[in-house]
Structure formats: structure tokens, C-alpha cells
Amino acid sequence: MVGTLVASFLKLFWTLFKTNLVRGLFLLFAFITAFTSASSQEILNGELVGWGPDISELPSFLFLYKEVDALTNTVEFVDVLTVDVNGNFSFVSPESRTEVYEFEAPPWSWRVLVRPGAVELDTLKLLKSSSGPTRVRGVMAKSVWHSEGVSEMHPSIKYDSLRMLASTLDALVLFDRMAQSGAVGSSAKLVDVQYMDSINSVFEDACSKLLLDEDIQESIFYRDLIKSRIWQWRSDSGMSKGEMRRVWYEEESRDATRSVSEKITSPGWCASWVEVNASWFVEADEDGELKSWVEAGNTDSIAIFIGGGVSEMELAMWWWDRAKPNSTASLWIQKNGLAELSILNRTVVEKVWCSSDLLSKTWTNPSIDLVPLDELYGKWSVLLILKSGSFSCIREWEALHAVEELMKNGRLDFRFIAVSIDGTQSKWEDLISQRSSSNQTLRWVGADPRWMDGLAISSVPQIVVLSPELEVYSYSAPIPSRGLGKYLQKIK
């Protein structure tokens, strides 16, 4: 195909070159630039696994996001990926550093570490959970980098092996840990200290060996994940918070290659920080001094307790305000700001659509025609969000029809629409066949996270009410069988 494109271009270039030298040279420059740019992008392969032989159940699209920071799990939309009938898809690798990608095909989501450039040689397999989903989106499922034909084991598999080892060793020392903590009455004398030390040695040796692995050393994110297991092990083994904090900042002082703002993009580093510092404000205020430090602007005392510099202090104060909202932490942030960690201070973008957003959207009617949403303009619109195969959705759909008939007696400024968020056309067609009357208005938007964000869809069945100007008036109105009619009568 590339050869055909090149041949077609050369033919066009020669024609332009003969008639207009400048235009011909400009086209040549543009082609070389575009071709070089496209060639430098590494295309990675993926596959959806576990949907069985019925391809009608297979998602047609995946929505790709990039995680901005691992503390808030804030993500940015990247792309919509097409999935073929065999479940295969492709995506572009990160340009310069390891990123946390989130793939979504509601209700399923997968969070994956993806290394930059041509490092990833394996196929990313996104696995469907064997148990059914419990909500309309955000159901986390497993993923694996499949290394068929590749001699080296992927670092994610190496990390998973360590995680499973930790789980096995945890089970072996569970009773001793409980006894040591006093959770099993007066059985502390039964603790086998030598046995626990030997298990600790097995785990520490496994971690040390893995940290020396060449693939792990080349990926700071995987190193951070391994260290997060170490910190969790230390905490479970009874290491005090004060000792953990001392060791933490002793180890952190040796890592001068990354700033704190860079570290908080790493899920493993954030998990370690939380393991060590989750309740730092409780420990710091045991003598009632923390509040006076903040009120007096005594940042030095706070920094000494935290054991770090300005960035570490900002992170600690931000965490305190987020974990346990209070006026003291808020006062400190207002006075001092988050200059070095401004990424944590950004304004949350409102995802619910406004009128201009809705006016630019289209949805599908039962005739498979795309219809603009401006068809709703001028009346109150009551949307029933539903999915095929849900008994409660079908029940509420019938109840919605009854509410619609009732409202016709006194209010003609309402219209009622059932909106399908089914992810496949076959499910959409099943829903069409379940209409009790062709007079019932039905639209399809698919399992699109953007629609779910835009209309604040969190469950099915759900009622969303739009104003005549196409503003979202409510996304938590009662469902038809539980008082929707009375609710709508009160709208003026």
C-alpha cells in the first residue's frame, strides 16, 4: 500500500513540477515531512480477549486515555480506537516516557503501563472478566502483555510474579503477624520470630533480584511498583510509621534524578508515598502543634517533620486537605499555594455538557439515521437511559410511556425519549424489537464514555431532564415508577 501511495505521489509531483516548480517543491517538502513524522510513530498492537465466538458482543471501539497524575487518577482523552471483528486494535506508543494508559469499552476499563518508542514488542491483551459487570462503566479488568515469539519476559509479567509471591508469603505469616500485633489475644508469645525473619528474607531477596533485572532497571515505573510492594510488606510486618518515614526519606534522598512533580505521575511511587504518609497529619498533631505551625506560618517545623523540601511539604498539605478536608490545611494552601506541584492545584474540568455541546451532537434513530439533537430544542426533554437485557429498564420504559400519556392531559411542553447506551448494534436492534409501539421515541448513542460524562450517566435505568434550551436540568430525577410524573408536574 505504501508503494502505491508513493507511486501516486510521484506521478502528481511530476505533473506539478512540469507546470509549477514552486508548488511542486512545496508538495515534495510536505510529503517528506508527513511521511517522516508518520514513520517515526511506533504502532503497538492489542487484542480483546474473552468475548467468545459471538462477535456481535465484541465492542467496536475502545476509548483511550492518558493518566495525568497517579494521585488523583485524572486522565486526558487521547483517541478512539477501532476494533476489528477478531478483536484486534492498534494504538500509538508514548513518545518519550512510560505512560499510564486507560482503555475503556464500557462497562470495562483497563489501566496499563506502556513504555515509549519501540520498546514494547509484545501484543497487549485486554481480558474480559469472567464475572458480570456491576455498574455501567469503570469495571476494572485484567490486561497482559503477551510475548509469543519474544524471548524476553515482559516486565509486567515479572512484576505480577512478585505480586503473587508476596500474596503467598503473606498467607504463611498471617497468624504470626496477627499475634504480634495483639489481635489474637495474649498469643504474642507464640510468634515464631525466626520463621518470620526467614519469610522476610525470601521476599526481600526476590525484590532485590528483580530490581537488578535489566528490563526493570530501564523502566522507573516498574521499579516504583516493586518498591511499593516492599513498603506494603514493611507496613504489614509491623514497621512503625515513624521508622517508615525515616527510611523513606533516607531512600528518597538518593533519588536526585526526578522531581516530586515527576514522581507523582508514577502509580508505584504514589502507592509507596501513601503507604508511608497517609496519616502523617495525625501523627504530627499528637501534641497539638500542627495547627499552631500552620497558623504561625512555621513551614520549617512542618518540613522537618515531613523530612523533605518545599515540594514534599506541598504534597503532604495537599494530601491532608484531600484525605480529611479541614480549615487548617485549606488555610495553609491559600497562604502558600502549590507553586511546585501546580498539577495538583488545577481546576477540575466540568464534564457535563452545556447547550452548545448538545447542539453539536447527533444520535441514531431506529432507521439507523443520524439525527441532530436540535430536534429536542423548544420543549422539556425527559430521557430514559436504558440497556437491552435489563428487566428493570424494560419495566421503566413501559412506565415512562404511561407517564407520557398522563402528561398529555395538562402539559404539552414535554417530550419523552428512551436512550440506549448498548455497545453493539445487535443489542440496539434487540431493544428496537421490544418497543410496545412505534410511537415511542427511541435513540441510540452506544457505549460512549463521552456521552456518559456529558449526561452524567451513572446507572440504568436513569432519568436525565433537559431544558427547552438544551441545558442539563437534572440527572437524578426519580424513575417513572417512583414519582417521575409528580416531579415533572412541578417544573415550571
Image (spheres, rainbow, N blue to C red):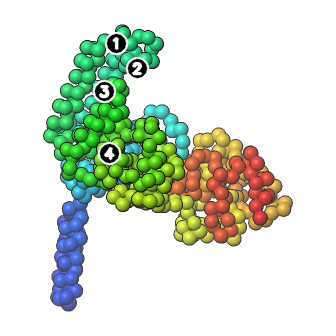
Residue 453 vs residue 230: left or right?
right
Q: Is residue 14 visible?
A: yes
Could you give the CA–CA distance between mark 3 and mark 1, rounded to whole angstroms? 20 Å
Quarter occupied by the C terminus: bottom right
Task: Name the residue: 37% across, 45% down.
Answer: 111
Task: Name the residue: 35% across, 29% down.
Answer: 240
Q: Residues within 10 Å of mark 2 (few under 14, many from 20)?
A: some
Q: Quadrant of residue 173?
A: top left
Q: Nearer the viewer, residue 131 or 140?
A: 140
Work out whether mark 4 precedes mark 3 in sequence or the reverse, and give the earlier one.
3
* Element on which disc 3 rests: helix
Q: Nearer the viewer, residue 272 or 182?
A: 182
Residue 285 vs residue 154: left or right?
right
* Element on which disc 4 rests: helix
Work out whether mark 1 precedes mark 2 in sequence or the reverse, and give the earlier one.
2
Q: Residues within 10 Å of mark 1 (few under 14, many from 20)?
A: some
Q: Is residue 47 visible?
A: no
Q: Mark 3 highlights which residue?
A: 166
Residues marked 2 and 3 touching at CB (< 8 Å): no
Q: Mark 2 highlights which residue?
A: 181
Q: Which mark is residue 191?
A: 1
Could you give the CA–CA distance between mark 2 and mark 3, rounded to whole angstroms? 20 Å
Q: Amino acid at mark 1?
A: Val
Residue 175, position as x, y percentages in the image: 39, 15
Q: Is residue 430 positioned above or below 488 on the image?
A: above
Q: Mark 4 highlights which residue?
A: 304
Give the number of the mark in front: 3 or 1: 1
Residue 160, position as x, y percentages in the image: 29, 33
Residue 268 vs residue 27: left or right?
right
Work out whether mark 3 precedes mark 1 in sequence or the reverse, and give the earlier one.
3
